[in-house]
Amino acid sequence: MKLWSETFRDGGLMPADNAFAEIDPASRVRLAGNRNPHLAWDEVPNGTESLALFCIDSDAPQDASLANRDDQALPLTAPRGDFYHWSLLDLPPAMRVVAAGEFSSGITPRGKAAGTVLREGINDYTGWFAGDPDMAGDYYGYDGPCPPWNDERIHHYIFRLYALDVPRLALPERFTGQQAHAALYGHILDEAQLVVAYSLNPELALTLKK
């Protein structure tokens, strides 16, 4: 399969309009546009019964207590893992495009509700905001990048599309990105991906724009 975007190029920079937060010189960060990007694809293999789309931050720190601290930087060597920003399932094989802003536009405190046509899992902001009384809730669908502003590592966001041999994955009504990704095992016919970078660390953000 081939996957591309009119929002960014593979290996390029994620626009702030597609992020959960952007740099604010006065207050470090502020909420951003949070629009899902445009994505399009073709060369879907014969036998495809459905498509599944994910967005994963592969550089997320595993220790949240190190994030966004004034007294220290989040070191480059800190343990990292996957943070799921989006899991979209049951896309019909004939579908070829997701329009910019089709599934997310703006911040929804306490999270967006589950979709009514295509299935979307809860993303990892559900756990991230669990202790915040103003933001806690189930965050379904797409919510964009918000890497720690004190992080010494540039974060990379993987948009990955899978062609599957089943029309519907066996998952509960409420599922996580991790559960959806695990359910793909044994059903993948083909896959394609784009990777884009983003940072809320002002020094690193300047290097991305060069």
Image (cartoon, grey):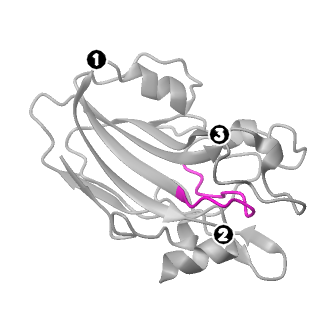
The stretch drawn in magenta includes residue 175: no
Does label 1 or label 2 sit earlier along the sequence?
2
Check the image and report above or below for 5 versus 84.
below
Q: Residue at x 59, y 64 (%)?
A: 19
Name the kind of residue labelled 3 in the image: Pro
Tags 2 and 3 touching, CB below 8 Å: no
Determine whether, in the image, residue 30 is placed left or right of residue 122: right
Nearest-to-viewer mark from 1 and 2 = 1
Q: Tell me which amino acid carries mark 1.
A: Gly
Q: Alpha-carbon neighbours of circle 3 within 10 Å: few (<14), some, or many (≥20)? A: few
In the orientation shown, which residue stands out farthest toward the left?
46
Q: Which of the two marks, 2 or 3, is nearer to us in this view?
A: 3
- Using the image, tell me which numbered label, if any, was put on residue 32: 2
In the rendered image, is residue 149 in sight? yes
Q: Residue at x 43, y 50 (%)?
A: 158
Residue occupied by mark 1: 186
Specify whether residue 138 is in view.
no
Which segment is the magenta one?
142-155
- Report x, y in % for residue 91: 33, 39
Q: Is residue 203 above or below residue 1?
A: below
